[in-house]
Amino acid sequence: MNLVNFCRALPKLELHAHLNGSLSVDTLKKLYKMQNPNSEDSDKIFTSIKDFSSLGECFKVFDIAHSLVVTPEAVFHSTYDTIKEFKDDNIIYLELRSTPRVIQGKMTKEECVEAIIKAFEVCKIDFPGILLKLLISINRKQGYKAAQENIELAIDFIKKYPQYIVGLDLSGDPMTGNTFLELLEKARMAGLKIAIHCAEISNETETIDILEFKPDRLGHCTCIHPTLQGSNKIFNLLLKSKIPVELCLTSNVQCKTVPTYESHQFKYLFEAGHPICLGTDDKGVFHTSLSHEYEIASSTFGLEREQLIKLCLSSVQYAFATLEEKQAILCKIEKFAKEYNVTY
């Protein structure tokens, strides 16, 4: 079996996937047709998705999805289609993250989350074998009040849907400088797991504050890199913290927060034995899949198949799942390893 087929067949965990950024072109065209049933312009509209060359331009791409996902029905279809595509890539455990939105006269934040949960319930029947979880996101750019609202919403919904709502994600444009750590502490006390996008730009004070806060997982950490000037101190702090890092290879290279795959921080964290997991970030925006991310890791850093399985197995530890769920996931991956005569 070649590497491509092996990575596709490997039962995988996706721990870093933004819902709107995961929407495929096919899903976006479907949503556009729902809004504009008589239009034939969808092909022209979506050409701009491929035309970006920086982290700032990447955020502009989300405007397209945001303009289309404006009703509970659109949220439902977005979620359902995205889960199906992850299932087709042999994802057995999926944590989606999404910022609840208010669309005046069309959708409340509560209705937005309910639509995602409804899609989860339907997908549980239609696509058995994939375990689904939701992280409610806080967008840095939306400010303190919106962050507070989303955290209160998450605390409320974890009581109603503890099988699905598992945590909070702090994300969005890192140049705004908002971290809302005091609010996140309240959420943590309420039983929510915390994932924070960290060090996507160089900001030593904020990075240290986040590391000292000790979230359950960190996203990207592209500027915590031992080859960057003055970064050794923070790199050692990260290693000492043992906080798992969600790494998204294609996303970082395409956004130019990392110049090449070969220089990606994966190499240094992997060699140091730090807890890491692979994710797609925004599979629709970056035209990738988790299988492809495993292929890149293998071909770029010389990982053998045994190491890919170990990477997948270790990701189970960092999932926001119950102990029973983790055991079931481990069994599936171990069964795969035995079937393909791969020792680890």
Image (cartoon, rainbow, N blue to C red):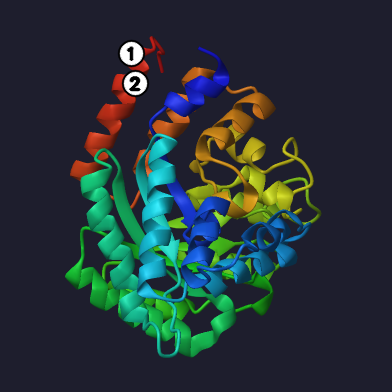
Q: Position of residue 68 (x, y in %)?
A: 52, 70
Can residue 226 be seen here? The reply is yes
Crowd rating for badge 2 (residues with CA inside 10 Å; few <14, some 14–19, many 20+)? some
Residue 184 located left or right of residue 335:
right
Q: Residue visible at 65% across and 38% down?
A: 268
Residue 339 - label: 1
> Is 287 or 332 nearer to us in this picture?
287
| Nearer the observer, 160 or 200 | 160
Does 182 sit left or right of 41 as displayed?
left
**Residue 175 placement, left or right of 78:** right
Res. 315 in view: no
Three-letter amino acid code at disc 1? Glu
| Amino acid of disc 2 | Phe
Q: Quadrant of the C terminus?
A: top left
Q: How many marks?
A: 2
On the image, the x and y values in percent for residue 67 come to 56, 74
Q: Closer to the camera, 71 or 187?
A: 71
The Cα atoms of the two marked residues, 2 and 1, are separated by 5 Å
